[in-house]
Amino acid sequence: MRGLRFLLMWMAAVAGFGAVSGTVGLDGKAVDPFAEAAKVRVFIFVRTDCPVSNRYAPELKRLNDEFARRGAAFSLVYADPAQSSEGIRQHIEQYGFPGAVIRDPGHSLVRRARVTITPEAAVFSSEGKLLYHGRIDNRYIELGKTMASPTRRDLEDAIAAALDGRRQPEESAPAVGCFLADVE
Amino acid sequence: MTRAVLFLTLATGLVQAGAITFYKDITPIVYPSCAPCHRPGEAGPFPLLTYEEVKKHAQQIVGVTRRRYMPPWLPEPGSGDFHDARRLTDKQIRTIERWVEQGAQAGSPADAAPLPKFTPGWQLGTPDLILEASAAYRLRADGPDEYWNFVLPMKPAGTRWVKAIEIRPGNARAVHHANVLIDRSRSARMQEKTPGSGFGGMDLSIEADTFDPDSHFLFWKPGGVPWEEPDGMAWRADSSTDLVLNVHMQPTGKPEMVQPSIGLYFTSHPGTKFPMLVQLERDGALDIPAGARDFEVSDDFTVPMDVDVLAIYPHAHYLGRVLEGYATLPDGSRKGLIRIPDWDVNWQSVYRYTTPVFLPKGSVISMRFHYDNSEANPRNPNHPAKRVRGGNQATDEMSHLWLQVLPRGDQDRRMELQEALMRHRLDKYPGDFSAQFNLGALQLAKGNAADAIPYLRAAVEARPDQPVALNTLGAALLSSGNASDAAAILERALQANPRYTNARYNLANALAEQQQWEQAAAQFRAVLKENADDAGARQHLGEVLRLWGDEMAAAHRPEDAVSRYRESLSFRWDDARLHSDLGTALAKLGRFREAVPEFETALRLDPNLDAAKHNLQAARARLEQASEPGAIR
């Protein structure tokens, strides 16, 4: 038993450098988040019970509307293994989140995207290179401290730069929200 | 090897001796301090009732408790002891931290603190009366915070005494806090585009025609326990009262429908104590330059009598930083009333003292508010920062320190208190409209119409189109016997607000006073069109029509007299003399058949009415003559 847990952890660590394993769709079938061709891949990490990621639903819709037609593929990533697929479906419907849906119960995509918070975003190139990971914008200074509207839109800038092939900072100031480590 | 051992303990659920566990150490913190909001149906965005639920937010809980963002509690310890203080101790915060450091272990459910009994729905049981907003407000999915006012008319017939209210937000997740204002003159509803639609605005002022100052804080915040007033502290609600519910909402990411309701709990014990809400403020000095890091405003009010302070409510908008209130007693000692070191308008609240704070006559209550209008203030709504002044809108600033004050002794001393407040205000703002107006209104309420007039004239000079001031000045002129000036001023009030029923009523009286019966009757009829139940207007219209009828009768116009008397009777059916006079006018027209029943009714109402007795006999005699054979039928 002890040996098995150890081995799995070690494998997951190695997997971070290559293909992502353990990600599934809402039907429970394995899904490779990098399988389909896309100019730029955007993953948004959310939780059903995180008020901060919920509040970003309209902004994510706006970004999807703006960039999907330019070749950016959006996916929502739910990393709480205890959350039911039915709960996720309801959540998406209630808030109108855009994009494909991936479950990442083993947090393999979380590690590859180097994210720790919901909501946090990761932008990958078509070759699977991590171009950006971090907050969506600077509206939240910290939990409970928000600006009326953001003055920096980090994710929007990152997607636009990736589509244009420009270089950009790979990391933002820390994202504000709920901890992914709490749902490992 | 060490790692392997640690794994083993986790996997088997074994807990090291002395380790911090959820059930033993965390439930005594989370159950009373978090669960009141963090449970299904309440405001908290996720429940925190079980081990699994708390563990799923463990690191977040460490972060928000360490920063004291949660549980939300703004006052600093050491300045005022308050009911339902939600502040965690440093030790409790450290315990949560260590629990998470040690792996957030469950422990044994047998060690758990008892889960508080939560009442679903109305916390005080079924209310005696429930007022629900007639239409829901649709809150957008995204965008800045919104403030909306719902106008809820009272329903019961007659006066009731309210010992408690409970506000159900209608959507706990979207509503951040709510505040009820008592609108006895139904002035706020005039701001609605259509009746029942409500209106926007962060703060509002209610206009009142009578001296009935606010006396109670009627406030709701998530997780708050409804406040039940002790005996003698109930407040009055009349059927003509509107309750205005001011609601602060935060978008959640999806559209939300918000339809709040208010539950009222009545008591048979009328209010026998007379508390009053006293406001310190310095909005007039709020002119904060862009970039100012520490802008201070102050106000100092000397209490004119011995008082107990029961509760306190500091209020500023987004730039407020440090909000402080304290009292300096006549012996020079200082009592802290409240100090909020890091103001957050989102968590504003009314704070009730566990023990009333006694302030002897001559104590000075001081307000010291500090504002940060720099870019460094994350809550600053303006980027770049810009000059901000005092005002009602969310983009303006405010500096209000409200105190619920109960003068010692059995008398109602609110007028004295109000007078002292308004004189203080006039010192702060010479020529100020509301100070002049209130001082005038106070004199009028005391029956000193002549003393009221100079203040009210000054108020009208400050704001020539303010309908309430014009109406009050009109009423004062009327009471002091100057009906013609009164009528002119009241006409102006109605020009400023044609739907102002009270001004129309006063105008009708001023016209009646000048014996302008026709115009007076027309105005009273208009009042009744706006409010058919207005007893005063019904009574006065009846009198005016009767006097008008008398004038017609004296001018030998019995036909006109009859129609005035008949209309008058619809308001004074039990006026024996009026029936008799109507009979007389009819008899003068030779309409004896109609005259007889009027005399009969008059005598039924007052058998000793000699004129009616005499005229009834005469009328009957004329009828008999007319019915003899040969007479024309």
Image (cartoon, helix red, strand yellow):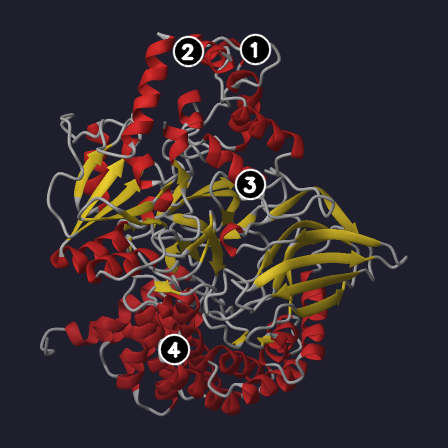
Quarter in which the N terminus of chain A is drawn: top left
Q: The disc numbered 4 marks a residue on which chain?
A: B
Query: Looking at the picture, which amino acid does disc 4 mark?
Result: Arg
* Residue B627 visible within the image: yes
Q: Which residue is mark 4?
A: B546
Q: Is B514 located above or below residue A44 in the figure?
A: below
Q: Which residue is mark 3?
A: B227
Q: Secondary structure at mark 3?
A: loop
Q: Secondary structure at mark 2?
A: helix
Q: Are marks 4 and 1 on the same chain?
A: yes
Query: Looking at the picture, which amino acid does disc 1 mark?
Result: Gln
Label 4 and label 3: CA atoms lie apart by: 52 Å
Q: Nearer the viewer, residue B420 or A89?
A: A89
Q: Which residue is mark 2?
A: B11
Q: The disc numbered 1 marks a residue on which chain?
A: B
Label 4 and label 1: CA atoms lie apart by: 96 Å
Pointer 4 or 1: first along the chain: 1
Horizontal arrangement in the rendering, residue A165 relative to residue B418 (left or right): left
Mark 4 nearby-residue class (10 Å; few <14, some 14–19, many ≥20): many
Residue B16: assigned label: 1
Q: Secondary structure at mark 4?
A: helix
Label 2 and label 3: CA atoms lie apart by: 48 Å
| Image quarter of residue B139 | bottom left
| Image quarter of residue B232 | top right
Mark 1 nearby-residue class (10 Å; few <14, some 14–19, many ≥20): few
Kindly report which numbered mark, 2 or 4, lies closer to the viewer in this rendering.
2
Pointer 3 or 1: first along the chain: 1
Horizontal arrangement in the rendering, residue B514 relative to residue B76 (left or right): left
